[in-house]
């Protein structure tokens, strides 16, 4: 059985002081649910303080991005080596990075490879726009994104990583995908693509998250879906009660508590 994983993507929110206060407010609740792997993804400047705070606990830290080179003249960037000093996970190819910072599939792939080389677990984001969905192109789009992100990644490496299916029209809109639609893409598209690219065992092992307006009210019905192994949570991860409630709903939906 796959260990469910819920990650809080804070995006560009929370100073180091605010971030540690937020984590302090929910740490005890989250540590009481070790059945779910909980990951905080703060902005870089809050990462070290949050990492120190949760050191030795069941909780984990993820970066929101990285650059693929190990070091050098790349002003403003953070390397995988630097990320591993504090983080176990790293979000790669979030739709906001693709949309606002021009990140392309090929760069996403380079980042995935660089992260894996440092022993980080990538959370690779894929998802379609509303226009693509309306045109009936969701399946081919998501499949192509998965294939591109995993170029030259081995079956063993793929089995250990996380893919987050995040329909762009559902992110920050309050309009989550229906549990059925989310399950369909996570299962029949993402997991099926992994089976085609590698084998059934790899497809069974990889963890697939749903992201896009997950909140305490809809988490249970989404997380109960068999091909959804957790969530990538934006807005609702910025409040202790709502994030803890989502983690608890995930454990309950999977029959773990
Ligand atoms: P949201 O964001 O939960 O605020 O919709 C999800 C994400 O972008 O990861």
Image (tube, rainbow, N blue to C red):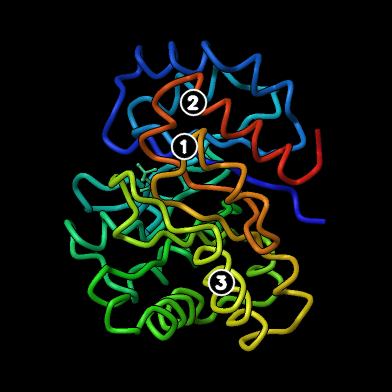
The residue lying at 79 percent from left, 76 percent from top is: 201
Say which residue label 3 marks.
184
Q: Are marks 3 and 1 in contact (CB under 8 Å)?
A: no
Local packing at callout 3 (Cα closer than 10 Å; few below 14, some 14-19, many 20+) is some
Query: Relative to residue 154, is residue 239 depicted above or below?
Result: above
Counting residues from the start of the chain, the first of labels 3 and 1 encountered is 3
Up-down relation of residue 108 to residue 239 (above or below)? below
| Label pair 1/2, CB-CB below 8 angstroms | yes
Please give the residue where the numbered disc 1 appears in the rendered image.
215
Whether the residue under disc 1 has CB within 8 Å of ligand 1? yes
Q: Give the CA distance from mark 3 to mark 1.
A: 20 Å
Disc 2 C-beta below 8 A from ligand 1: no
- The reply to whether the C-beta atoms of the residues labelled 2 and 3 are less than 8 Å apart is no
* Residue 58 position within the rendered picture, expressed as x and y whole percent measured from the top left: 70, 29
Secondary structure type for disc 3: helix
Q: Which mark is residue 155?
A: none
Query: What residue do we see at 49% from left, 40% from top?
Result: 62
Q: Which residue is mark 2?
A: 242
Q: Earlier in the sequence, mark 1 or mark 2?
A: 1
Residues at marks 2 and 3, CA–CA distance in whole angstroms:
26 Å
Residue 143: give x, y in percent of width and height. 46, 81
Q: Residues within 10 Å of mark 1 (few under 14, many from 20)?
A: many
The Cα atoms of the two marked residues, 1 and 2, are separated by 7 Å
Q: Quadrant of residue 160?
A: bottom right
């Amino acid at each position: 059985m796959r260990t469910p994983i819920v990650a809080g993507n804070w995006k560009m929110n929370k100073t180091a002081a605010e971030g540690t206060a937020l984590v302090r407010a929910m740490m005890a609740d989250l540590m009481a649910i070790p059945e779910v792997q909980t990951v905080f993804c703060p902005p870089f400047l809050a990462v070290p303080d949050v990492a120190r705070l949760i050191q030795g606990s069941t909780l984990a830290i993820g970066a929101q991005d990285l650059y693929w080179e190990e070091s050098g003249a790349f002003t403003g960037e953070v390397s995988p080596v630097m990320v591993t000093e504090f983080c176990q996970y790293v979000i790669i190819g979030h739709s906001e990075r693709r949309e606002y910072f021009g990140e392309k599939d090929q760069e996403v792939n380079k980042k995935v490879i660089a992260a894996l080389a440092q022993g980080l677990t990538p959370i690779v984001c894929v998802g379609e726009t509303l226009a693509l969905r309306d045109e009936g192109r969701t399946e081919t789009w998501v499949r192509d994104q998965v294939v591109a992100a995993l170029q030259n990644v081995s079956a063993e490496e793929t089995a250990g990583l996380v893919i987050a299916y995040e329909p762009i029209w559902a992110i920050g809109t309050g309009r989550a995908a229906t549990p059925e639609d989310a399950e369909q893409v996570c299962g029949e598209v993402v997991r099926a693509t992994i089976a085609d690219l590698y084998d059934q065992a790899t497809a069974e092992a990889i963890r697939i998250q749903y992201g896009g307006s997950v909140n305490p009210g809809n988490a249970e019905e989404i997380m109960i879906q068999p091909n959804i192994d957790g969530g990538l949570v934006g807005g609702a991860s910025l409040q202790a009660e709502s994030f803890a409630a989502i983690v608890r709903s995930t454990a309950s939906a999977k029959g773990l508590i």
